[in-house]
Image: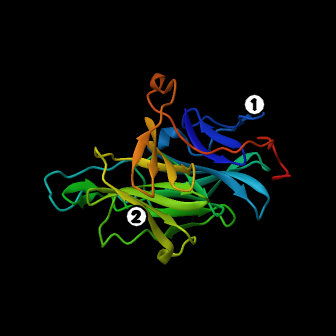
Amino acid sequence: MFLRGSCDGLLCITVDQDLMLLWNPATKKYRLLPPPMLSSDEIGVALCGFGFDSLNDDYKIVRAVCYDDFSLNNDDDDIGVGMEKELKVEVFTLKSGSWRLVASFPYCSHFNQMGKLVNGTVHWKATQSCSLYPVNGKYGLPLRILGFSLKEEKLFELPHPDFDGDSLLFDLGVLRECLCISCDYKGRFEMWILKEYNVSASWTKLLSMQLSEPVRTIEPVCFVDDDEIMVDYLGRRLAIFNIRDNSSRNLILPGAELFDSFYAATCVESLVSPWSTNGRA
């Protein structure tokens, strides 16, 4: 079971690639969705997102899929060998109660992801091809930030912070309704926030700190006060990072040890029905 998005008190959940549902944990009401048009038999990776389209007054679930078929040439120190791929995008709307194919885009992803909703747009990380190449002596992916507008149903690329020309692995998050990224940059963990949407110069560094152990994935979750941010370590534990003094502390979650992993996301209680056909009314 995977969390795929949160909006207006509704959670989008996948039980497997083909079984999805909307659930309001406050009212306990849920809705099973019809199977997507793109079957899991054809897919290696699925990107999902959920949000509200204010132009059409409708909730939408977005599913972008790509065939995960690439190989890495370990005999070549300069470049990995992969195949060019496309993301195929389909959309489900609550008003129509059905899926429809939107378009294909020349991007690829090796990550199953929960889309980050900012400015009426779902965001993922992806690459322009499935080829791999070395970064700082290790094989990494030339990642891009993609946005899918729920109003226009178009995919576009957003700028990321200037890392002195380096190509980094990073994670996306949302803090105070702004897109943010976290990454391991030159041995230090850094977190940046995009204060003005889609404006490259507005990327602002929130913190830069030395961690006691290297961690591949640390995802920002939310501010808990003016100086402290909750983060998710690989879906295995939560921690608090202080942006004023660059300190950190782990959070104790009773019962977390019973699960292999978990998803952390914000959810504000509401009475919105997963069967809604009249938008936010």
- The local crowd at label 2, few if under 14, some if 14 to 19, many if 20 or more residues have their Cα within 10 Å, is some
Kind of element beneath mark 2: loop
Does residue 177 lie above or below 27 as drawn?
A: below
Q: Which residue is mark 2?
A: 128
Quarter assignment of residue 3: top right
Does residue 28 lie above or below 94 as drawn?
A: above
In the figure, is residue 211 to the left or right of 224? left
**Position in image of residue 110 (x %, y %):** 40, 49
Q: Which mark is residue 28?
A: 1
> Can you say which quadrant of the picture contains the N terminus?
top right
Identify which residue, 263 or 52, lies in the foreground.
Answer: 263
**Position in image of residue 81 (x %, y %):** 25, 56
Identify which residue, 46 or 160, lies in the foreground.
Answer: 160
* Residue at image coords 24%, 60%: 135
Observer able to see residue 86: no
In the figure, is residue 84 to the left or right of 197? left
Of tags 2 and 1, the one toward the viewer is 1
Please name the amino acid that badge 1 sits on. Answer: Lys
Please name the amino acid that badge 2 sits on. Answer: Gln
**Position in image of residue 169 (x %, y %):** 35, 56
Does residue 236 lie above or below 219 as drawn?
A: above
